[in-house]
C-alpha cells in the first residue's frame, strides 16, 4: 500500500469509476495504470443490466471527464483484486475527491451497496 500523494497525468476516462493514468513513481519514471476509484461503484458502461444503467453510466463517465482535468493525485493506493490496476482515492488538482463527487450527485453508490440502476 502507498499513502501518496502520487502525481499522475490522466490518459483517459474508462468509465465512471475507472481512470487510466500515467503515474510518476520516481524521478523520470512513470507507469501507465488503470485506477479504480476507492469506495464507489458507478453504473456499468460495458455490461449494463438494463438501458437505464447504460444511460446513467454514460452520465457518470461524462461527469468524470468534465471534472478530472489533465493532472490528478492518487491517495491511499492499493493493489486491486484484478491484475493490471490499482484502487485509490483520486483527487483533482483543485482538491475535489472524484469518488465523493460521484456519490454526492447520485452517479455512484458506495462499494457493496445494492445498485439502484435497474430497479
Image (spheres, rainbow, N blue to C red):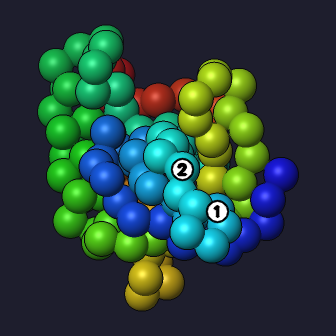
Which image quarter holds the C terminus? Answer: top left
Q: Nearer the viewer, residue 106 or 42?
A: 42
Q: Is residue 92 above or below residue 111?
A: below
Task: Report the residue at 43% width, 82% height from top.
Answer: 93
User: Separation of disc 1 and disc 2 at Cα?
Assistant: 7 Å
Q: Quadrant of residue 46?
A: top left
Place of residue 80 in the rendered image (x, y in percent of width and height, measured from the top left):
68, 33
Which label number is shown at residue 31?
Answer: 2
Q: Position of residue 92 (x, y in %)?
A: 43, 75
Query: Marks 1 and 2: CB-CB under 8 Å?
Result: yes
Q: Is residue 8 visible?
A: yes
* Residue farthest toward the right in the current orientation of the protein: 1
Q: Does residue 2 appear left or right of residue 97 in this picture?
A: right
Q: Residue furthest front?
A: 28
Percent position (x, y) of residue 110? 58, 45
Up the image or down, 63 lies above or below 43; here it is: below
Helix, strand or loop at label 2? It is strand
Earlier along the polypeptide chain: callout 1 or callout 2? 1
Q: Is residue 113 left or right of residue 34?
A: right
Instruction: Write the residue at 32% across / 39% down.
Output: 15
SS label for mark 1: strand
Residue 100 shows up from this direction: no
Residue found at x 38% / y 72%: 71
Q: Nearer the viewer, residue 3 or 64?
A: 3
Q: Position of residue 112 (x, y in %)?
A: 65, 32
Toward the viewer: 47 or 53? 47
Residue at 48% in and 41% down: 34
Residue 25: mark in rendering:
1
Q: Give left or right: position of 27 versus 16.
A: right
Q: Considering depth in this image, is 40 or 50 the residue closer to the camera?
A: 40
Amino acid at each position: 500500500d502507498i499513502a501518496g500523494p502520487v502525481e499522475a497525468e490522466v490518459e483517459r476516462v474508462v468509465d465512471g469509476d475507472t481512470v487510466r493514468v500515467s503515474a510518476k513513481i520516481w524521478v523520470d519514471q512513470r507507469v501507465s495504470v488503470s485506477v479504480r476509484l476507492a469506495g464507489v461503484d458507478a453504473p456499468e458502461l460495458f455490461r449494463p443490466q438494463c438501458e437505464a444503467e447504460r444511460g446513467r453510466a454514460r452520465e457518470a463517465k461524462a461527469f468524470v471527464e468534465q471534472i478530472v482535468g489533465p493532472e490528478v493525485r492518487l491517495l491511499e493506493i492499493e493493489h486491486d483484486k484484478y491484475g493490471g490496476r490499482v484502487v485509490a482515492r483520486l483527487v483533482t488538482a483543485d482538491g475535489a475527491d472524484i469518488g465523493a463527487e460521484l456519490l454526492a450527485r447520485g452517479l455512484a453508490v458506495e462499494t457493496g451497496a445494492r445498485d439502484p440502476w435497474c430497479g
